[in-house]
Image (cartoon, rainbow, N blue to C red):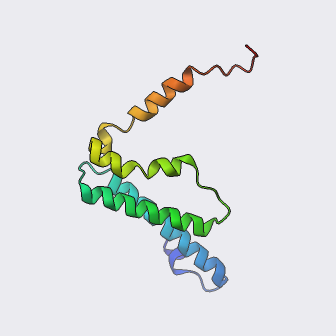
Amino acid sequence: MKMWSTGVADVPNELRLQCQLLVKSTMLLLMEIQWAISYQTSPRHAEATRQYLELYMKTLQELFPNMDLHPVHHNALHLPDFLLRFGPIHGWWMFPFERLIGILQKVNNNYKIG
């Protein structure tokens, strides 16, 4: 990380800037996760989560301009609202996934007609 963020002398400037942006993007995501998984929640936690997530997505678009954002990115933007409504993530984070697994288990996917 330190080498990527400070750069190496013999690396082209464009690659150095891209590496620095990748480090920044990674750190933004880590900060968002730290705020989101805290054992306490408040409007400050929710706002910090939102800000870091939005900055992370902007750096993703800078790094990968041809990449489309996916539903998971949209869903992540709802985390701050869930923090305010339901409290710390540790109390509820598996419920939506367990529900989705239950729905998916009912889907017939044996590749046979009928």
> Relative to 93, is 62 on the left or the right?
right
> Relative to 73, is 31 on the left or the right?
left
Q: Against 107, is 85 above or below? A: below
Indicate the quadrant where residue 113 lies.
top right
Using the image as rendered, state which of residue 94 and residue 72 is in the foreground. 72
Residue 42 visible in the shown view: yes
Using the image as rendered, state which of residue 7 and residue 37 is in the foreground. 37
Q: Against 19, is 43 above or below? A: above
> Relative to 55, is 61 on the left or the right?
right
Work out which residue is located at the far right of the displayed protein and give it: 113
Residue 11 visible in the shown view: no
Residue 46 location, x and y as percent? 31, 55
Residue drawn at the location 58% of the way across and 73% of the way down: 19
Give the number of marks: 0
Work out which residue is located at the far top of the displayed protein and give it: 114
Indicate the quadrant where residue 99 lies.
top left
Residue 66 location, x and y as percent? 68, 62
Residue 15 location, x and y as percent? 65, 77
Residue drawn at the location 39% of the way across and 32% of the way down: 95
Residue 63 location, x and y as percent? 60, 68
Residue drawn at the location 73% of the way across and 13% of the way down: 114
